[in-house]
Structure formats: C-alpha cells, structure tokens
Image (tube, grey):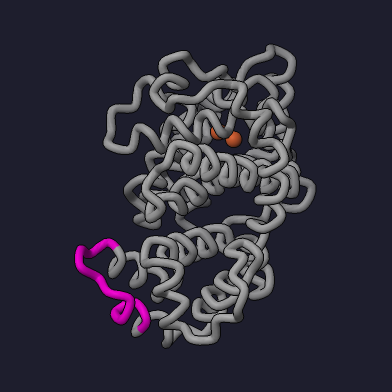
C-alpha cells in the first residue's frame, strides 16, 4: 500500500474519532480569549455535570494536595486557574476519545500511558526547576502527557505493520520515529499534529506534540516547552519509566541542555519525585475512566 493511502487511512480513522464535547470546545474557546474571568468559565462548566465532576475531583485529589475539601466550583476554578481548567478539560477529553488501544494491539497501552505520565511530570518538574511562570506549569504537564498521542491511531490502524515498526526500531537501533518513517513514510508527530488540527487544540501543546523529535528544526514561540518535552521524553526512556516503543530515542543536543540550563545529572535528582508525581497525576487518566469513556 502506498504512503499516501496509509496516511489517508490514519486521516479517516482520526475523522471518525468522537468529536470533543461541546462544553470542552466552549471552555477552550473562552479560555483562549483575553480577559476571561473565572465567572465566565463557571457559567460554561456548571451546565456540564461530567466536566464539573472532573474539576472537583482534580482539585480534591492528591495531585494538588490541598488540606481542606473544596466544594464549590467557582472556588475550584479560582484555585486551579483558568489555564489549568482549560488543560484539564482538553486532556481528559483527548484521552477519553482516543486513549484506549484496540485489544492485542502492538503497543502496550499501560506502558504507553505510564511513559506519557512520566514525560508529563518530568516536563513539569524541569519547568519548576527552571522557575517557569507557575501559570504555565500545567501546560508542561499536558504537553508531556499528550506528546506521543499520534502513536495510538497508528498502532490501532496498522497493527501488524506497527509491530514491524517496533521491531525494526529495535533491530536497527534507531528511534521509533525513524522506524515509522522508514516503514510507513510518516511518523507519530505527523499524526499527532493531525489530531491537534482536527480538534483545534492549537498553541503550545500541539507544538510539543509535533516537534518533540525535531527541536532543532522548530522555530515557533514555544521553544522552551518543546525542548523540555524532548528532554523529558529522553529521561523517561533512559529511566525506563513505562514504555512507548522507543528504545533508542535521540540524545538531546548540548544546545538543548544549554537552552534550558540543565544537564543529564538532573535525571538522578528528579528520580524519586517522578515516581511520587506519577502516582498523583494518575488522576488525569482516572477522571476519564470513571465516566467509562476511556
Ligand atoms: Fe515521541
Ligand atoms: Fe515519548
């Protein structure tokens, strides 16, 4: 089958995925407008019990580690911040719509999501270490959580050929993205970008999804975020936290480390924190599970 037909099969698959719920689309739209207030957000969320339950569950989870139980939505929105609520709505909707692999698919979904959570929390820990604006920190987590999302449709659509991709990467000791390109003509960052476009994700998260294996070639405005996800991905592959098919990810360049002002030694420093943070962040996947959507 030719490359373009293969790409078309993935596009068709993406086209058939359930659309983002209307409320989620509205939340994203409202949050992207300058000057949005927690009151505006409250109005949209309070009409959607599912989303409201997710926000309340998150604010009261170990992830935020607050002492007293928060019971009012408006207070939760103020505490989480507009950006976090947007990211929560977005990520749980994406995981809900696409998160499950098909039975007996080549990539183990448990390993995949553990890797994704690991990259999310590591990206966040690196950002914290670099004193990134706290309002942007959650974006680092979500970008890491979703960075490999393009692998899921490939894994589900091609099955045996994706198994061939995985073994080729191992056999030739090349990165998974290289093996995908050699075997299928495109890679999971291309597919990730398509998902992002289909759902109008936009901005920082979609840049991290599309450029995490090509930091050098990325010239957009979210360079620190893209570089951080790239490094976090390398760290989690090296530390073997979860597994998303990549045994030979490219080593980050000196420029990337310099840009972020960190080095490989940071991995040792973060090791224990990563485990604890993953356990707390699992709530992002669980809030979806409870609804039966993922
Ligand atoms: Fe990747
Ligand atoms: Fe990855």
Task: Give the percent coordinates (x, y) of residue 256.
Answer: 43, 21
From the viewer's perspective, is 74 left or right of 273?
A: left
From the viewer's perspective, is 4 left or right of 109?
A: left
- Please state, as top left, top right, bottom left or bottom right, where the N terminus lies in the image: top right
Task: Give the percent coordinates (x, y) of residue 232.
Answer: 56, 33
In the image, 66 versus 256, the foreground residue is: 66
**Residue 40 belongs to the span the image colors magenta:** yes
Q: Name which residue lies at 55% across and 81% down.
A: 70
Q: Is residue 9 visible?
A: no
Q: Is residue 88 visible?
A: yes
Task: Give the percent coordinates (x, y) of residue 206.
Answer: 39, 45
In the image, 3 versus 63, the foreground residue is: 63
The span shown in magenta is: 32-42
**Residue 42: quadrant of the picture:** bottom left
Q: Name which residue lies at 44% across and 71% down.
A: 79
**Residue 50: quadrant of the picture:** bottom right
């Amino acid at each position: 089958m030719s490359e373009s037909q293969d790409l078309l099969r993935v596009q068709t698959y993406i086209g058939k995925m359930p659309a983002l719920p209307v409320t989620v689309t509205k939340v994203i739209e409202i949050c992207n407008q300058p000057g949005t207030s927690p009151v505006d957000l409250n109005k949209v969320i309070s009409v959607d019990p599912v989303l409201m339950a997710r926000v309340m569950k998150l604010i009261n989870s170990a992830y935020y580690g607050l002492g007293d139980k928060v019971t009012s939505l408006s207070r939760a929105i103020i505490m989480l911040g507009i950006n976090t609520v947007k990211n929560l709505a977005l990520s749980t909707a994406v995981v809900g719509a696409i998160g499950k692999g098909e039975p007996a698919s080549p990539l183990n979904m448990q390993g995949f999501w553990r890797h994704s959570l690991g990259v999310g929390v590591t990206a966040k820990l690196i950002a914290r270490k670099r004193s990134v604006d706290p309002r942007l920190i959650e974006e680092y987590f979500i970008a890491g959580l979703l960075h490999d999302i393009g692998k899921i449709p490939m894994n589900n659509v091609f099955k045996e050929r994706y198994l061939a991709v995985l073994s080729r990467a191992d056999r030739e000791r090349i990165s998974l993205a290289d093996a995908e390109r050699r075997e299928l003509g495109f890679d999971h960052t291309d597919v990730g970008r398509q998902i992002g476009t289909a759902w109008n994700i936009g901005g920082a998260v979609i840049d991290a999804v599309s450029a995490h294996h090509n930091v050098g070639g990325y010239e957009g405005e979210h360079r620190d975020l893209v570089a951080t996800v790239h490094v976090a991905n390398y760290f989690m592959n090296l530390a073997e936290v979860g597994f998303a098919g990549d045994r030979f990810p490219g080593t980050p360049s000196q420029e990337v480390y310099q840009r972020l002002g960190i080095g490989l030694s940071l991995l040792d420093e973060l090791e224990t924190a990563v485990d604890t943070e993953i356990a707390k962040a699992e709530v992002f996947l669980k809030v979806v599970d409870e609804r039966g959507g993922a």
